[in-house]
Image: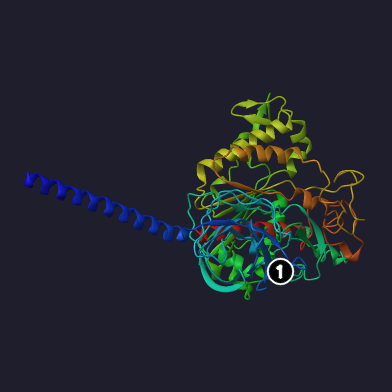
């Protein structure tokens, strides 16, 4: 009996100990939770708005932004950068910012800000709260890059200096900044042209308007200004560095030759010794020759031009017993082998598709052994471009070669065509169209875009039609040749080509913009 009583007492003591221990453990666990929970990060959402709109910020200046959280507390954030857009910013309890920060300085897609850790959590806000003339933001394919930035942030009245190492997850949503560089206006700029008309030895007589007697030089001083962003001024030294060891090739009709000569003149400004530029076969630039390969010795690069009116093969076919000129719209131009291996290709075709033979389409367009009795010009143009596109997709390596297609260049004949008394001599200034005005898009441009959209190889369209359409003042007109014996210029006017310096320099500035942008994109990978 005594033994049973002793065991029962021990059991009760053991049970009491177990209950007490459990109770103490629970109290300790609860105490720990109370102390740890405040350490867990809690995110406060802020809506940023600029509180200084008085002027556009320049590099190195500070823009102040005001943030209000759900408790209506106000904090300030200072950022020494131009045109900065914030979206989906959170301030955690530990003082760190998280969210999306987008810096649009110089058009670069970079993440900057005063944060120790940042994650891209939502798509960027499409509006620009600062309204500083920045381009519209759109989701795109460029992967955001890591960056470090030292900044001062004033949160809750305390100044904290931190270096922001933006840790980005590449699997998160990607953002691309775009600007419509073709939506703009011409502005008069005394710092233009990019070169003197008398200092360039590569302009042939037909484009050398000043040498041919055109005394009004204002046509040289107009600069294209996009409405919501800027394109960089062409830097010939930087361009030569970008194409060092490479081939830049222009392929097309005489309008593309116009652009090629412009490029040669701009690049020549960066070469002090003219003997360091030479034509590979010793050719001088004349209208009779259609192939040029100029070497820049110090940069081991070449700037080339190959003439082709249609990008497809001009041939001959048989109609009855006669052999007639035909256009093989199923075969690429016979000089295409020279295009292969280039690093930058700039194509065009348009000018010759308006001639009588191409427009009528009677016994002219050929596919295989079939000579079409009649084929409308739009269908023939579309088939020809598909032939060109097939060649590009087969022979161009997009990892090496950047491909451009320049849209049609407008003519400005009044009172007739080039051979029926058409003229443009009276025009002294660009046309005053507002950029918002709806201008019909030429059918050729629509066909070009349709074909390019179906290609495998990326092709950038240099859409120069609208901006060039405003420049009725930029053609040679009667100054396409030197007057004989000092006589007053007369005869057929050229309202299709362009004086140099002049409008094609702007086409090359747009080309330069794309080449620089691609180089920046590749450098960030």
Residue at the outermost bottom position: 272
Q: Is residue 325 visible?
A: no
Describe the element under mark 1 as helix, strand or loop.
loop
Q: Position of residue 21 (x, y in %)?
A: 27, 54
Q: Residue at x 60, y 42 (%)?
A: 333
Which quadrant of the figure has residue 224? bottom right
Q: Horizontally, is 22 left or right of 134 in the view?
A: left
* Between 170 and 405, the one nearer to me in the picture: 170
Q: Horizontally, is 39 left or right of 107 in the view?
A: left
Q: Is residue 140 visible?
A: yes
Q: Residue at x 67, y 66 (%)?
A: 82
Q: Horizontally, is 184 left or right of 125 in the view?
A: right
Q: Position of residue 166 (x, y in %)?
A: 51, 62
Residue under label 1, please give it.
57
Colour scheme shown: rainbow
Residue at the outermost front position: 1
């Amino acid at each position: 009996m005594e033994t049973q009583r002793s065991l029962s007492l021990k059991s009760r003591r053991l049970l009491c100990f177990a209950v007490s221990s459990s109770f103490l453990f629970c109290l300790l666990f609860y105490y720990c939770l109370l102390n740890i929970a405040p350490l867990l990060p809690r995110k406060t959402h802020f809506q940023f708005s600029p509180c200084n709109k008085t002027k556009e910020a320049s590099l190195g200046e500070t823009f102040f932004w005001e943030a209000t959280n759900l408790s209506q507390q106000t904090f300030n954030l200072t950022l020494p950068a131009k045109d900065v857009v914030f979206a989906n910013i959170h301030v955690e309890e530990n003082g760190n910012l998280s969210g999306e920060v987008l810096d649009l300085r110089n058009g670069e897609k970079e993440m900057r800000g005063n944060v120790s850790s940042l994650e891209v959590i939502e798509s960027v806000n499409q509006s620009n709260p600062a309204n500083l003339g920045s381009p519209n933001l759109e989701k795109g394919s460029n992967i955001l890059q890591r960056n470090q930035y030292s900044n001062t942030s004033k949160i809750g009245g305390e100044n904290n200096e931190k270096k922001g190492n933006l840790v980005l997850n590449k699997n998160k949503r990607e953002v691309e900044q775009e600007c419509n560089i073709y939506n703009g206006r011409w502005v008069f700029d005394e710092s233009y042209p990019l070169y003197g008309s008398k200092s360039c030895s590569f302009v042939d007589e037909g484009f050398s308007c000043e040498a041919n007697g055109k005394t009004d030089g204002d046509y040289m001083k107009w600069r294209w200004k996009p409405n919501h962003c800027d394109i960089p001024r062409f830097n010939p030294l930087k361009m030569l560095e970008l194409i060092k060891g490479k081939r830049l090739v222009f392929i097309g009709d005489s309008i593309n030759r116009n652009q090629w000569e412009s490029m040669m003149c701009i690049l020549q400004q960066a070469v002090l010794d003219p003997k360091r530029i030479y034509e590979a076969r010793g050719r001088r630039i004349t209208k009779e020759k259609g192939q040029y390969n100029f070497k820049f010795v110090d940069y081991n690069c070449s700037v080339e031009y190959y003439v082709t009116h249609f990008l497809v093969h001009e041939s001959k076919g048989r109609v009855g017993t006669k052999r007639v000129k035909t256009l093989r719209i199923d075969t690429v131009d016979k000089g295409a082998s020279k295009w292969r291996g280039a690093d930058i290709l700039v194509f065009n075709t348009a000018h010759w598709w308006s001639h009588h033979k191409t427009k009528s389409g009677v016994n002219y367009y050929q596919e295989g052994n079939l000579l079409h009795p009649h084929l409308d010009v739009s269908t023939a143009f579309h088939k020809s471009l598909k032939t060109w596109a097939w060649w590009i997709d087969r022979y161009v390596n997009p990892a090496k070669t950047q491909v451009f297609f320049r849209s049609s260049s407008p003519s400005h004949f009044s009172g007739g065509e080039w051979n029926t008394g058409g003229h443009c001599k009276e025009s002294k200034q660009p046309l005053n169209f507002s950029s918002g005005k709806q201008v019909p898009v030429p059918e050729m441009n629509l066909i070009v875009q349709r074909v390019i959209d179906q290609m495998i190889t990326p092709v950038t369209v240099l859409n120069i039609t609208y901006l060039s359409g405003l420049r009725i003042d930029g053609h040679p007109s009667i100054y396409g040749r030197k007057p004989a014996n000092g006589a007053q210029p007369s005869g057929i006017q050229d309202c299709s080509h362009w004086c140099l310096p002049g409008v094609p320099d702007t086409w090359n500035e747009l080309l330069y913009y794309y080449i620089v942008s691609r180089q920046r994109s590749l450098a960030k990978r």
